[in-house]
Amino acid sequence: MNNLMKTVVYITILVAFNSLSSFGQTYMGPISKPTSGYGADGSYTVATQSFNNPNYSGHDIVIYYPTGITSPVPTIFYSHAFGGNNPNNISGFLNFVAKKGYAVVYVPYQTTGVTVQDRYSNLLTGFTKAARDYPSIIDTTKVGFVGHSFGGGASFANAFHCFTTLNWGQSGRFVFAMAQWYSYNISQTELQSFPNDVKLLTIVYENDDTNDQRMANDIFNTINIPASEKDYLRVKSDTISGYVYTADHVVPNNSAFDALDYYAYYRLFDAMCDYVFNGSNAGKDVALGNGSVNQITMPGGLHNLVHSETPTFANAQSTYQYPCSSSENPRIDHCDEALSTSEIVADMRFSMFPNPAKTLFYIETDKAISQIDILNQQGQLVLTTNTKNISISELPSGLYFVKVGFIDQSLSVGKLIKE
């Protein structure tokens, strides 16, 4: 990020973001906003509280919250994209959160002249200052960390600190990451010891050529969150009645504030809050529905969202301005994990039951087996056997890959959930 070319690219992105403020509240396209259910605007009016940003003079931290609250409310800590340090750029989302009855903390961070670590610290300091100084608004027992691009990558380290050091989110917590950039300040050990009661929704965009989706895939596959409590969705582009819905890097906050914002972002976020903060099963079915109809269905002829339990890469790294293999990526060694770089073999030549399983599962196949390997989400071998009746009672809950080798030297891989 220190060379001139990358600075120019980021400044270009900054200009694009800053040009959006006049469009932020103008809804466009032939598909209408939802009028009921998840994604529909809430009934609260919005109040704001601004205060000094200790790390970025002249760019106040702002809390958006429901007018007239008499007790603290669940709170979202938002990490904006690089260069998007004007809250008007995402005023649609900030107001949406407050209208639904929650608070959201917006912390601007400096674009140039500082390090990545400085920006992370700027965000974290702002979040903790807001929580400390405004306890009448912010309920730190119910929290969500939401981030886009640079902010998506940053959300994991800052959330981990707040969850594990400050004990935030004891009554509900989640991370919602979109089109994420590289993730700094969090180690493999920390990802694998992430509190497993956290919920996660990762979203990528079909025509994003800025951030390599391998970064999102890597964190999603590595983080210690049960498969039942995390989901990964891909948003597709479309043309409806001549109007182009482009799923690229500037969604959300496109120059067109449209159905992609409401149905592929606000709707899912709304449902996640209802599930995490209120325990709603309907909310879980939409936000973390494991590919359910209610989760993936888009309106008005838009392509459905694409769900994956084991995210894979759509494009070559050369497609992206910021490839996973860049020396800037602190997790460069995790770009090409064997089980996250290509689709799991589609023509699986065996079946497993039960699946999900608690203590035992069984392999059924007509082919002669030579060896069965079970690997965790990081591609690490955790069990090897040659029997079709397999005990997994010693394995922790989560998603596993079952790799079956046959006598004819062919290979097939399937997915197993351990409850």
Image (cartoon, rainbow, N blue to C red):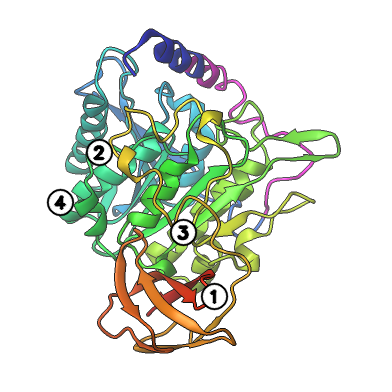
In the rendered image, is residue 41 in sight? no
Residue that appears at 50% across and 62% down: 309
Residue bearing the label numbered 1: 408
The amino acid marked with disc number 3 is Met
What's the mark number on residue 166? 4
Find disc 3 in the rendering and name its residue: 272
The type of residue carrying mark 4 is Leu
Quadrant where the C terminus sits is: bottom left
Nearest-to-viewer mark from 2 and 1: 1
Q: Main secondary structure of the magenta part?
A: loop
Residues drawn in magenta: 14-35
Q: Amino acid at mark 1?
A: Asp
Check if residue 245 falls in the magenta segment: no
Q: CA distance from mark 3 to mark 1?
A: 46 Å
Q: Could you tell whether 349 is left or right of 277 in the image?
A: right
For mark 1, give the secondary structure: loop
Circle 3 Cα neighbour tier, 10 Å, few/some/many (<14 / 14–19 / ≥20):
many
Would residue 27 be counted in the magenta stretch?
A: yes
Relative to 207, is 199 on the left or the right?
left
Mark 2 is surrounded, within 10 Å at the Cα level, by few (under 14), some (14 to 19) or many (20 or more) other residues, namely: many
Say which residue appears at 24% left-offset and 24% top-offset: 53
* Viewer-proximal residue among 234 and 215: 215
How far apart are the two marked residues, 3 and 2, measured between alpha carbons? 21 Å
> Which comes before the other along the chain, label 1 or label 4?
4
Cα–Cα gap, marks 4 and 3: 22 Å
Q: Report the residue marked by disc 2.
A: 127
Inter-mark Cα distance, 2 to 1:
58 Å
As helix, strand or loop, the secondary structure at mark 4 comes to loop
Looking at the image, tell me whether mark 3 or mark 1 is earlier in sequence order.
3
Give, as a three-letter code, the residue at label 2: Phe
4 or 3: tag closer to the N-terminus: 4
Label 3: element kind: helix
